[in-house]
């Protein structure tokens, strides 16, 4: 069994999300011509007989604008350090020197495949020059050409990736966990607001479980449980006539909307589970071992 982490880097619009979609076989990452649509670390977990690949798509090489971006940038930095393999994507129509500067600045430890993308139509004629430009660059292990959009060269790239991954057991149990990292992060945002809003030990006794995360046409519907150990804690979280939890919901929703860039309908429930800390259920329910 091969198992490992593959991080995809490249300038906005290089085709990272399109490539991920081609790998995953269904539309999982958000594809749009706008920059900064990619916001999460893990974008897809591809589990097939013989291998598991955990793909991440970076939130772009951007300056931290606000706190959350800083967090995401930290995630990018640690992904850089953890990755087994990096895909450095280049749009063959683009200015190569900018990508070169970014890839050099990354100071990758993991081996990197340079992926020349959009080698379809008129892009075919550009591939040779791009290949020449990147040949011999210190960060390049191998250069591959694909059309992520037409899925040309994608099966071959996938095979190359699998060949380069280390032997190991799968990191995730199930094969359809793609929104888990998002859910996990949304849970963290709610927890952050619990820390802001409540006193003393309350935040330390509260866990957040995102039970439902549904993308509807105009908004994302999120249902989350706040899990505490005692009825008294539940009472504090709710507040008089539910005043506190309404405030929590308002604040958390604003943060989540900023993070996801979409309207959110958020419902919070408070549940008492006396022993949640003992059985690390909150982690297992997210598929983390
Ligand atoms: P990202 O910002 O790196 O995630 O890039 P996207 O995947 O969102 O793609 C940006 C744009 O390039 C979209 O309009 C895609 O349709 C287009 N695109 C991506 N891959 C290809 C490709 O292989 N060929 C062509 N012609 N266009 C592509
Ligand atoms: Mg993208
Ligand atoms: K994009």
Image (cartoon, helix red, strand yellow):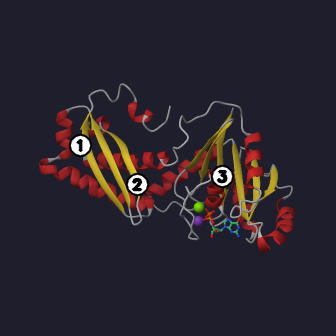
Mark 3 — residue? 23
Can you identify the residue that label 2 sits on? Answer: 214
Quick check: 197 left or right of 209? Answer: left
- In space, the residues marked 1 and 3 are separated at their CA atoms by 46 Å
Q: Quadrant of residue 169?
A: top right
Residue 280 coordinates in the image, percent (x, y): 40, 29
Image location (x, y in percent) of residue 155: 74, 51
**How many other residues sit within 10 Å of disc 1, few (<14), some (14-19) or many (≥20)?**
few
| Earlier-in-chain disc, 3 versus 2 | 3
Relative side of 288 to 163, left or right: left
Q: Quadrant of residue 36?
A: bottom right
Earlier sequence position, callout 1 versus callout 2? 1
Q: Nearer the viewer, mark 1 or mark 2?
A: 2
Q: Secondary structure at mark 2?
A: strand
The quadrant the N terminus occupies is: top right
Element marked by disc 3: helix
Q: Which residue is mark 1?
A: 199
The response on whether ligand 1 sits within 8 Å of label 3 is no
Q: Do residues under tags 1 and 3 come within 8 Å of each other at their CB atoms?
A: no
Instruction: Identify which residue is drawn at 48% across, 49% down.
Output: 179
Callouts 3 and 2 close, C-beta under 8 Å? no
Mark 3–mark 2 distance (CA, rounded to whole Å) = 23 Å
Which residue is found at the position 36% from the left and 42% from the top? Answer: 209
- The reply to whether discs 1 and 2 touch (Cβ–Cβ < 8 Å) is no
Q: Label 2 neighbourhood size at 10 Å, few (<14), some (14-19), many (20+)?
A: some
Q: In the figure, is residue 232 to the left or right of 288? A: left
Residue lying farthest left? 241
Q: Residue furthest top?
A: 278
Residue 66 is situated, as x and y percent measured from the top left of the image, at 45, 60
């Amino acid at each position: 069994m091969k198992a490992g982490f593959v991080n995809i880097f490249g300038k906005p619009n290089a085709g990272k999300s399109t490539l991920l979609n081609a790998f995953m076989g269904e539309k999982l990452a958000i594809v749009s011509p706008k920059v900064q649509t990619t916001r999460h670390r893990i974008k897809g977990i591809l589990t097939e007989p013989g291998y598991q690949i955990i793909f991440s798509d970076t939130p772009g090489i951007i300056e931290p604008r606000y706190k959350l971006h800083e967090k995401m940038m930290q995630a990018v930095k640690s992904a850089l350090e953890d990755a087994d393999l990096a895909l450095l994507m280049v749009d063959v129509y683009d200015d190569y020197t900018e990508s070169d500067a970014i890839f050099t600045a990354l100071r990758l430890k993991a081996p990197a495949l340079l992926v020349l993308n959009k080698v379809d139509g008129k892009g075919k004629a550009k591939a040779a020059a791009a290949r020449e430009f990147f040949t011999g660059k210190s960060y390049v292990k191998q250069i591959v050409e694909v059309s992520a959009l037409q899925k040309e060269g994608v099966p071959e790239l996938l095979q190359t990736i699998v060949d380069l991954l280390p032997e190991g057991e799968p990191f995730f149990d199930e094969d359809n966990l793609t929104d888990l990292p998002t859910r996990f992060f949304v849970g963290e945002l709610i927890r952050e607001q619990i820390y802001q809003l409540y006193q003393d030990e309350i935040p330390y006794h509260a866990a957040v479980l995102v039970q439902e995360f549904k993308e509807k046409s105009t908004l994302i519907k999120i249902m989350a449980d706040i899990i505490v150990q005692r009825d008294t804690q539940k009472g504090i979280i709710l507040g008089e006539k539910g005043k506190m939890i309404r405030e929590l919901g308002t604040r958390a929703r604003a943060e989540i909307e900023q993070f996801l860039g979409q309207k959110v309908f958020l419902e919070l429930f408070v549940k008492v589970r006396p022993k949640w800390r003992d059985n690390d259920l909150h982690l297992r329910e997210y598929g983390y071992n």
